[in-house]
Image: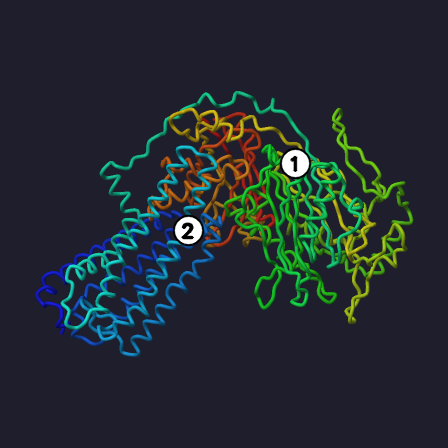
Amino acid sequence: MPPVSLPTEWINNFVMPAIITTSTLSLFGCAFIFSHAFKSYCQREPIDFTMRMIIVMSIIDLFDAGFKLFGTYSYSYRGLCNVQGFVMNAAGIAAVSWLACMSHSWYSWVVKRDCEATLRRWFVVYLIVSFLPPLVVSLYLGMTGKYGPASFYCWISDEYKGMRITFFFSWIIASALFILLMCLLVIFDAKRRAQQQENVEAQTSLASIYNKLAAYVSVYIFVWGPSLINRFVEWQRSEDDPPILWLLGLHIICNNSQGFLNAMIYGGAFRILLRALRFHENSEMESLRTSLCSNIPTTEVLTQTISLFCTTFNMGEGPMPEDLSQWISIGHDIYVIGVQECLNIASVRAKVKEYLENSSQQPYEDYVREIGCSNTTLGYHGYIGILIFVPLESVQSGRFYMPKPSKSEVNCGKLLNVRTSNKGAVGFAFRYLDTSISVVSCHLSSDCKGKSQILRRNEDAALVWQSLNLSGDSYFMDFPLLHHHTIVLGDLNYRLSNKNATSATILNLIENTMRKHKWISTPSPQLHTLVIDNENSEWTTENVKIFELDEDWSHLLEHDELHAVMGLNQVFSGFEENTITFPPTFRRTRGFSLSKNNINDCYCTVMPHGGGTRVPSYTDRILYHSLDNVKSDLNCCRYQSHEDIDTSDHKPVSCVFRIMTKESPYAPSYQNLKKVSFMTQTSTMMDYDGVKDCTILLKELLVQWQSSMFPPLSDNGIFTAKVPLIGLEDKFCITTVFPLPLEDIFSDQRKLHELAARWDHGILPLHANDLSQRHLNHFQTSWKEALLNGIHHRCYAQAKRNMHIALSVHTDSESFGQCTLNLENAYTLPNEFHTFQYNLTSKGAITGTLKGIVQVKIK
């Protein structure tokens, strides 16, 4: 029987029809989302993370609306009443928990700049958080007999009204507060991004985001507000007080409409309705100042060569050297210092900055990142850090620019299968004039008790390659492919044990080489200083204290693990190392130097506690990588160790790079804003100097996988893309990124456009003819579509030198091959197809080859 406090006639004439109507609408909303998801699946369209979240939300709504249809009918059947109460309680808590998880995904996507692959790793966590607690709570209520009549369906019985607050509405309130916090963080970050370039498109996307967030919060309040108020009033109302029927009716209508409203707002049904009513049509925005486009040819832009000093030092938990002139030379434009096993990063930062400012008589801006811990009792050996020092004038003038990364650190250590920061990597990416550079400081796994850990080191390197995202928002790309030049330095821990040589053999090789060649002595202990002669741009050296440059240490490097794995393209594919002209840097005896002491005193080959012997090795290395068309822009001028630094069991290693950069032929964005500031309207993206409507066409794509990636289907071991990839071809997608983040003046606002477009479309797919697509810089195409019709990548971008498009072949969880295509020829001769062939790599290893033709259209 229904509760006596509610009129039976009112229940029959209003409650049940309202429940049936609103629940049916919610079921139709769920059907709308499921049908479009199924259509996307059948058409092999990518199902992104947002779509997955919406589908799960609709599954929850399906159960909730389906069991609400029973209404008061379940009062007469105890078993059905318990099931209805269990499902409704679990679905209600799961629904608000899932909405909270969705808001967290927005935060991760926008504020933390996580990519699709990173977001997918959260999916299982979201499922556990959203479903496990509701199931446990609801099961407890059922086992203790708390379900029964609750006004208009079975739920927590009217006898236990106080438990409704504890076991249900506390979740509603907590989720509401969490969602509000996430929305505020997204709004603040979105507003900051929009302020980078205050153009029409950025402001439009920002307004769309504001409206969507307001709609999400409003729907949440609309669905759960009346329900919360009504149940609280029921809890406080005495048995003699009459029920508030209008509040009960509002509760039914609002709460039961959840599935319908979610389909309208989250699923994109509202967009279809507006389009049908012709209230939502894409239209081109009229450009205010197309005359702002520069007419300066890129070939006439002034060239500037910068000096980049890079060094790595495993400090071995020791102090900073007293005389930094023996380690760090002066006269460079940028300083990159990587340290490992450093107990006090702040001290290193302060001393280096003081040394540079006193030596050069100018202020410096510094940037520091580190991982690790100074508590050595926990198994840590200090911090892995990277420090960058740049003259303040370079930063203030805009020549040096550093974006906010999405992930600048990777933990590679392992403790009970948990990644720890005693090993790993940290990095930066920056742009100097028109050239992008990434720098990373690494400390990879060391040998354990004389046993080689080369496979573990390779795994660490692969993890670093796929995990670091240094140049802004994250993409499905290894970080070296998104920058013109990449420099990796650190204690890589590769040993001279490739041929299983003993420590005595290696020491003999070192000693024989040193006998043949003399040590160069100089009158001054100061380290060399590199100077640029402005007239002939040649490098000269002064006060150098190193081995002679014609020294050949190749007989030692035949034993080098790193050269062996690089030769097999197993790791660090595409990276180079300058000729090594110095003796092994590890393991050295503290307080000793080969320039002053004999070789046996300088190397420590006996491991403590009877662990055997240790082979002297080149563990401290500096590697570099450049994209194909800019390789000639980077020149490694000096690669050396610093013997007189004796505070550690390692010797510092440094390298000086000479990098050719160019002033952009287009004015910086803030100057463009000044040019259009007198306009009554805000400028558009096309008003910025050199910005064009660019379309990149990639056709006739052919992938040849290496036989190590897939079982060969032909005698020559070649595996082509036109042959089914052992059942994976249906799961493959191709993601393209253009422009690369640090080639893109709109990089900060791209995420705004992506977020606005994704929220606006909901479950509906984005199509190439949507105007919003031109505001994005990365697209995903199904494998089948790419092979049949090619890839069409269209967006607004500056047409300038050194433009590239990055490409990744991947599934939802793993990338099988990536490359970065040079578009210089295609830009020089637009509207013509140009052939290309590039190696595909993944996690630093070559996986195959990509061939095809590319065309650039500009208007």
Residue 429 sits in quarter: top right
Q: Secondary structure at mark 2?
A: helix
CB of mark 2 within 8 Å of CB of mark 1? no
Q: Nearer the viewer, residue 849 or 520?
A: 520
User: Where is residue 31 drawn, in percent x and y?
Assistant: 26, 54
> Badge 1 is on which residue?
631
Pick whichever, 806 or 671, lies toward us: 671
Residue shown at 22%/64% (left/top)? Answer: 68
Q: Quadrant of the N terminus?
A: bottom left
- The quarter of the displayed image where residue 364 is located: top right
Q: Is residue 781 above or below residue 27?
A: above
As drawn, the label of residue 106 is: 2
Distance between the Cα atoms at labels 2 and 1? 38 Å
In the picture as drawn, the residue positioned furthest to the bottom comes out as 144
Give the numbered dot on residue 188.
none
Quadrant for the C terminus in the image: top left
Q: Position of residue 173 (x, y in %)?
A: 34, 61
Disc 2 vs disc 1: which is toward the camera? Answer: 2
Sequence-wise, which precedes: disc 2 or disc 1?
Answer: 2
- Dot 1, how many residues are within 10 Å of its Cα: few (below 14), some (14-19), or many (20+)? few
Point 74% across, 58% down: residue: 316
**Which three-letter amino acid code belongs to the residue tagged 2?**
Trp
Residue 496, position as x, y percentages in the image: 77, 56
Q: Position of residue 551 (x, y in %)?
A: 84, 43
Residue found 31% across the figure and 48% down from its top: 215
> How does the figure colour the protein chain or chains?
rainbow
The image quarter containing residue 538 is top right
Between 496 and 193, the one lying in front of the other is: 193
Is residue 516 shown left or right of residue 349? right
What amino acid type is highlighted by mark number 1?
Lys
